[in-house]
Image (cartoon, rainbow, N blue to C red):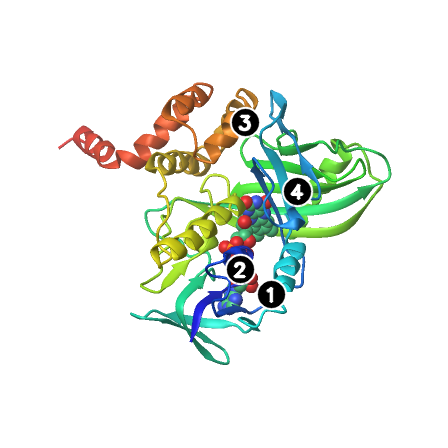
Amino acid sequence: MYDYIIAGAGCAGLSLVFHLLKSDELKNKRILILDRDPKNARDKTWCFWGREPLEYSCAHEVAWDKLVFQGPQKSSSQNITPYTYYHINSLEFYREILSMIEALPNVDVKWEKVLWIEDGKEAGRVNTVRNTYEGKWIFNSINFSPRVREENTIQVLQHFKGWFIETQEEVFHPGQATLMDFQLSSPDEISFFYILPFSTRKALIEYTVFSNDLLAEEEYETELKRYIQEVLGTSEYTITHKENGVIPMTNREYSHIGGKRIVNLGMIGGDTKPSTGYTFFNIQKSVKSIVSSLVVAGHPFERPSRQSRFLFYDTLLLDIMNNDPHAIRAIFEGLFARNKMIKVLRFLDEETSLWDEAWLFLRLPWKYFFKALFRNYFPRRVKKAELSLKPL
Ligand SMILES: Cc1cc2nc3c(=O)[nH]c(=O)nc-3n(C[C@H](O)[C@H](O)[C@H](O)COP(=O)(O)OP(=O)(O)OC[C@H]3O[C@@H](n4cnc5c(N)ncnc54)[C@H](O)[C@@H]3O)c2cc1C
């Protein structure tokens, strides 16, 4: 019997292992890590903002103190001190943590596909293609039903393709990352470019779309080529690596409680910010609270709860993305280019006061939020009003 079984050795699973092993009280527990994939590929680039660097050494390389927003009408480039915008190469992260546990006798790693997980009173069981393992606590980040959409929830897919390129000329500004560039996007859709420059000639450029349908592979590539040519003004470059992904953004209320003995982690534990897709930093906060709950309370379930008004804001924005996508460029422009970026980052971290939020919202086109409010929170009243207007 293991003390802890970590089902899924991705971002959340390995972040949890890292913090368990940093804890004097928990570092000698018997741990099993399971994943279907040996984690030897660079599949993601995780970005996040923070007031200080994280404990992982792979996060310290290149970081940015300035963020750029380029809207259809207004642009803004701002220093974000006391924050820094960091990035992590997922392969370096997997390697750092897997090499940390290589020599530890109390941690086993098995590359086996998990088929299902069972809850129990005193322990949980994880069934893989080869074995069944028992653990006092099961930490699961495997989504057994991806892309299943629950009724009465709003979902928008954030889908993107990124190229790491090296140009012949010096075209990038290494001190500043571009969060969103709407210069080439058409008014009816939500699409933008994202740039992480690593030097004057090397950068990751991503074409991102918020919608319900994915594009054909060549469509992302055509847009990337167009941006490099028309906005960066160069056609002399080599692509050194490609990355793509889909992040479901939803107001579905995921629970971190998966059962009496099962804890949900990462995206399926509700760590994705519904309106932005940012997940990495929330995962770090969650795994730290799991570790402190295990130490202090003897179980992993104690954690600070989320203020419900932030889910309300996320719901409105997701609704606008679905029903009034043409309004999003103006909303993002109001938020990022007409406010102090550090205030927006604090808001996205859900650390602002009501007063701060009122100030941020003053600069937004309100009409769309009222429409979303009525669609989501007063549908019965709207229906009733419609019915009463019908002739008898
Ligand atoms: C390309 C990409 C870029 C992203 N960039 C950012 C970013 O910049 N900033 C940010 O905040 N968020 C980002 N995200 C969102 C989020 O941070 C990541 O998706 C993150 O990896 C989520 O962590 P997780 O542990 O929940 O899932 P994962 O990291 O996907 O881990 C789940 C693990 O489960 C394993 N698994 C799945 N099924 C099984 C099975 N049946 N049996 C065994 N193992 C299984 C997988 O192999 C994987 O290792 C990005 C997402 C993608 C896809």
Q: Nearer the viewer, residue 160 or 142?
A: 142
Type of the residue with mark 2: Leu
SS at badge 1: helix
Q: Looking at the image, which residue is at 61% across and 34% down?
A: 84
Q: Quadrant of the N terminus?
A: bottom left
Residue 21, label in figure:
2
SS at badge 4: strand
Estimate the spatial distance between the alpha carbons at disc 3 and disc 4, rounded to whole Å.
23 Å
Task: State the residue position of label 4.
Answer: 206
Q: Looking at the image, which residue is at 54% across and 27% down?
A: 342
Type of the residue with mark 4: Glu
Estimate the spatial distance between the alpha carbons at disc 3 and disc 2, rounded to whole Å.
33 Å
Type of the residue with mark 1: Ile
Estimate the spatial distance between the alpha carbons at disc 2 and disc 4, rounded to whole Å.
35 Å
Q: Earlier in the sequence, mark 3 or mark 2?
A: 2
Q: Earlier in the sequence, mark 2 or mark 1?
A: 2
Q: Quadrant of the C terminus?
A: top left
Task: State the residue position of label 1.
Answer: 101
- For the residues bearing labels 3 and 2, Cβ distance under 8 angstroms: no
Type of the residue with mark 3: Ile
SS at badge 3: helix
